[in-house]
Image (tube, helix red, strand yellow):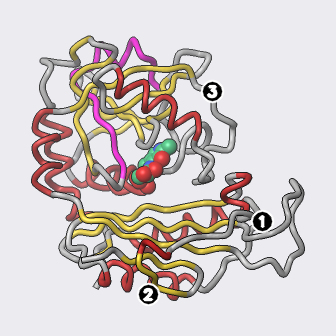
Amino acid sequence: MSRIAFVNGRYLPYAQAAVHIEDRGYQFADGVYEVCEVRGGQLIDERRHMERLARSLRELRISLPMPLPVLGIILRETIERNRVRDGIVYLQVTRGVAKRDHAFPVPETKPSVVAIARSKDRAKGETTAAAGIPVITVPENRWDRVDIKSIGLLPNVLVRQEAREKGAGEAWFVDRDGFVTEGSSSNAWIVTRDKKIITRPADHGILRGITRTVVLDVAKKLGHTIEERPFTVEEALAASEAFVTAATQIVMPVVQIDGKPIGNGHPGLVATSLRAHFYEAAEIAE
Ligand code: PDD
């Protein structure tokens, strides 16, 4: 089956799915994106992802290309046309096509909208979660508007490659004061020896992950003590558990940081239970 992409109003086979070479996403990374999980053919946490998309666009003064419910219809259609039961749908909106000039183009410029959907093997994700992943730490070198889900991801790309070359599954950015900010495409968490769940507040220095928000709800429901505060690499190394969250991984246990084992070196009970209970708190579309 050939894959189909939504590109600026049309559903096209991949071979014909293209944007203009003067798209500002291509020239300036002048755009934003969202990744939603698809599970059993249903969108997970669509409302929150769409609201964050609208916020990212507002922050960059890119106009919303269409009402959010219409974007939701496009996501569903893209999922269906690609027969995705379990996987992800990716939505990208850029400031559109214009003659190259750093400043904004004329206000009539239409944002470009692209959506693609891809199947993922659910069992493979479970196998990875059962083993847990190693992470490496890297110096934070991103701009200070990482709260915007921008397609400008070069620092994230470089550290993720570094992680891969070192046999790790994720890289954690560490700020100048030694505090972990977040992963290259996930939020970072630890569980202390006295069973407190710690994650950095989403007011500065990180993306407010949708999975993060839902996991906070799950943790509260399960009666855990939560502290939203920064944590250092040293504290993470002394923790009993660590994990990351993202729409692509839900809750993924971390078993090593920079080659040193966390806790007993295996996925922790808290992370495993948060993963198991995630869909009780997530919003699952009809
Ligand atoms: N990334 N932090 C960063 C830098 C991210 O890129 C992501 C998600 C997250 C987690 O956000 P959420 O829980 O809403 O997925 C945190 C997506 C999955 C990606 O780039 O593929």
- Type of the residue with mark 3: Asn
Front residue of 129 and 210 = 129
Residue 94 part of the magenta segment? no
Tag on residue 141?
3
The disc, 3 or 1, on the residue closer to the chain's N-terminal end is 1
Question: Hey, what amino acid is under mark 1?
Answer: Arg
The quarter of the picture where the C terminus appears is: bottom left
Say which label, 1 or 2, has the lower sequence index: 1
Tell me the kind of residue under disc 2: Ile
Is the shortest distance between ligand 1 and the CB of mark 2 under 8 Å?
A: no
The span shown in magenta is 231-246
Mark 1: secondary structure: loop
Q: Residue at x 60, y 48 (%)?
A: 147
Residue 283 place in picture, x, y as percent:
32, 71
Most foreground residue, 50 or 111? 111
Count the marks.
Answer: 3
Q: CA distance from mark 2 to mark 3?
A: 37 Å
Indicate the position of residue 23 as horizontal and vertical percent values. 71, 65
Which residue lies under the disc numbered 2?
73
Q: Indicate if the residue with disc 1 has its beta carbon within 8 Å of ligand 1.
A: no
Vertical order, 105 against 254 (above or below) = below
Q: Residues within 10 Å of mark 1 (few under 14, many from 20)?
A: few
Q: Is mark 3 within 8 Å of ligand 1?
A: no
The local crowd at label 2, few if under 14, some if 14 to 19, many if 20 or more residues have their Cα within 10 Å, is few
Q: CA distance from mark 3 to mark 1?
A: 24 Å
> Quarter of the image holding residue 5?
bottom left
Q: Residue at x 20, y 47 (%)?
A: 274
Residue 61, numbered label: 1
Please state which of residues 69 and 117 is positioned toward the viewer in this rendering. 117
